[in-house]
Image (cartoon, helix red, strand yellow):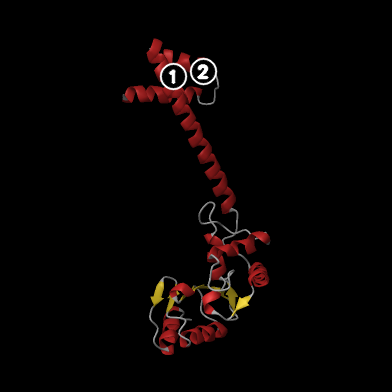
Amino acid sequence: MDKLKQGIEQVVENTKYSDEDARMRNEIASLGYTGQDLEDIFQRAKKYQRESLERDRARAEQYKWEEQNNRKPERSTQEQIDKVRKHLLKKHGTTNDFNRAFYMLPDGRMLNGSLGGYMRDTDHREISDAYIDNDIEIREQNRGGTGHYMEDFMKHGNYRIMPENKSIELYTKPTSEQYRTIVNLWRSGKLDNLEVNGNYLENIDSESQIANFFRKHFQD
């Protein structure tokens, strides 16, 4: 069976880019097969040929995507992120209601993420529209995904708000405005948890806990 498989592979390799069935049959005949055996192997070889060509096309497309993707910058510039924030403010507006918010900006304001007006119902990745509409390209993490836009946005000091978990996720040291908003949210009973680069502060019970948590993870 291994010898037969190798024979089929060799036939396909020799005729991969040929549309002439006769040539493939001749290749199989040269291996010593005749009659129904030849026809059975021909059908198997044609199937293997199609699969092989599909794999080649997929590899070529992946290579092309990787080549194009690697030309893109890893992060947006400050000028570009200012355009993104302006776009989002115009599209979503701001809210003082933590339950409707989906991001906190460096100035402490919260972007409205509620279409229905009752709770956050906008996916965090939807900010990708602000990048795309402004022709801002950055390197993708996964082909066809939009999570890289969210990552970039957060690396520029914008915090992801998850009111359903009473939590905020952040990558950067809070500005004085962000710190004040965070403390006020905790005091009002709306915020219980913080996450900094995979490190968690849960069930916050004092402002000093918040301050110490930030001091620990943003030493400068």
Which mark, by number, is residue 21?
Answer: 2
- Residue 70 pos. (x, y %): 56, 53
- Callout 2 crowding tier (Cα within 10 Å): few <14, some 14–19, many ≥20: few
Which mark, by number, is residue 58?
Answer: none
- In the visual, does 19 lie left or right of 45? right
- Residue 81 pos. (x, y %): 63, 69
- Which residue bears the numbered disc 1? 42
Q: Are marks 1 and 2 in contact (CB under 8 Å)?
A: yes
Residue 93 figure quarter:
bottom right
- In the visual, does 83 lie left or right of 163? right
Position of 140 relative to 162 (above/below): above
- Residue located at (53% from left, 86% from top): 180
Foreground pick, 100 / 36: 100
Quarter the N terminus occupies = top left
- Mark 2 element type: helix
Foreground pick, 60 / 185: 185
Nearest to N terminus: mark 1 or mark 2? 2
Whether residue 23 is visible here, answered yes or no, is: yes
Mark 1 → mark 2, Cα distance in angstroms: 9 Å
Whether residue 31 is visible here, answered yes or no, is: no
- Residue 57 pos. (x, y %): 53, 37
- Callout 1 crowding tier (Cα within 10 Å): few <14, some 14–19, many ≥20: many
Position of 135 relative to 195 (above/below): above
Residue type marked 2: Asp
Residue type marked 1: Phe
Position of 32 relative to 129 (above/below): above
- Residue located at (60% from left, 56% from top): 72
- Residue 147 pos. (x, y %): 52, 60
Foreground pick, 208 / 95: 95
